[in-house]
Amino acid sequence: MLNQHKILRVFKLISLLKKAPAKSPRNIALMIDTAERTVYRYIDLINEIGFEVRKDKNNRYSIKHDDEGANECFTIEEASLIKELLLTSAKNSVLKEGIIKKLFVKTELEMEANHLINANNSKIVAQINDAIMHQKQVVLQKYFSANSNNISNRIIEPIQFTNNYQMLCAYEIASQQNKFFSVERMSSVLPTSKNFKFAAFHRFENLMLLALQILITRN
């Protein structure tokens, strides 16, 4: 069971590092529930597997995005097809095992990491939908803010998801504002028994209009 937990943490780390912005070892440690020194060991491990982990001048880490090297590597679908062909038509080849190890360990880890994060996101969406239905407050635990690069718990009254379920519009009690929260940046959700107290202030803003307003303000 202990090794299983370690594997799950590595998968989660891969998913976290593939999503902008780059993250500090301290924040990563908080998000995957481990020690900071362990984060460095995991980073070394996924580098050895074949992922290109980058460190910026602020000691924050990220994984090179697939589209940056699109002409240099296979997609997951292409790699899976090549693996299938190797397994069926190169049974007696002495080179087969080496090729599979070099090309597909990374690919299968990416697939498992994607399955893990998708399953976690589905659970989060279900919990929040239940809270919306019953008009209950929830706590977004260890929410990672791209603006401040900090991790904190957010007490919210969830209002509505965007059509693709990637963003949640919610009333944040601490700031007394309606905000959009990224589902991918939610580590987990803690349901509460507290009823909505600020329903009169709930507003579901159009995300595109909101982005346009921000751009106009900045310019």
Image: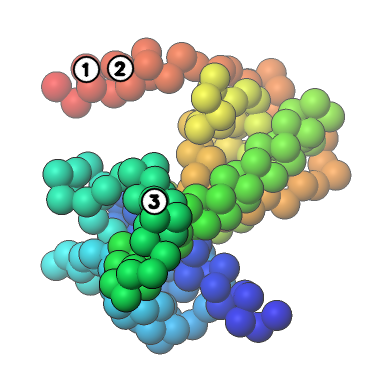
Label 1 crowding class (10 Å Cα cut-off): few <14, some 14-19, many 20+?
few
Mark 1: which secondary structure?
helix
Q: Which mark is residue 159?
A: none
Give the camera-side residue of 36 and 156: 36
- Amino acid type of the residue tagged 1 in the rendering: Ile
- Of residues 95 and 5, the one nearer the viewer is 95
Q: What residue is drawn where x is 69% and y is 45%? A: 123
Give the mark, 3 or 2, whose residue is nearer the N terminus. Answer: 3
Which quadrant would the N terminus be assigned to in this image? bottom right
Q: Position of residue 121 (x, y in %)?
A: 60, 44
- Neighbours of disc 2 within 10 Å: few (<14), some (14-19), many (20+): few
Relative vertical location of residue 171 with respect to residue 25 in this rendering, above or below: above
- Above or below, 208 against 113 in this view is above
Residue visible at 49% across and 45% down in the picture: 184
How crowded is the residue under tag 3: few (<14 C-alpha within 10 Å), some, or many (20+)? few
From where the camera sits, is residue 61 visible?
no
* Pointer 2 residue: 213
Q: Secondary structure at mark 2?
A: helix
Give coordinates of residue 14: x percent, y percent: 41, 62
Of labels 1 and 3, the one closer to you:
3
Q: Are marks 1 and 2 in contact (CB under 8 Å)?
A: yes
For mark 3, give the secondary structure.
Answer: helix
Q: Which residue is mark 3?
A: 85
Tell me which amino acid carries mark 2.
Gln
In space, the residues marked 1 and 2 are separated at their CA atoms by 5 Å
- Residue 213, given in percent of the width and then of the height, sits at 30, 17
Residue position marked by numbered label 1 in the rendering: 216
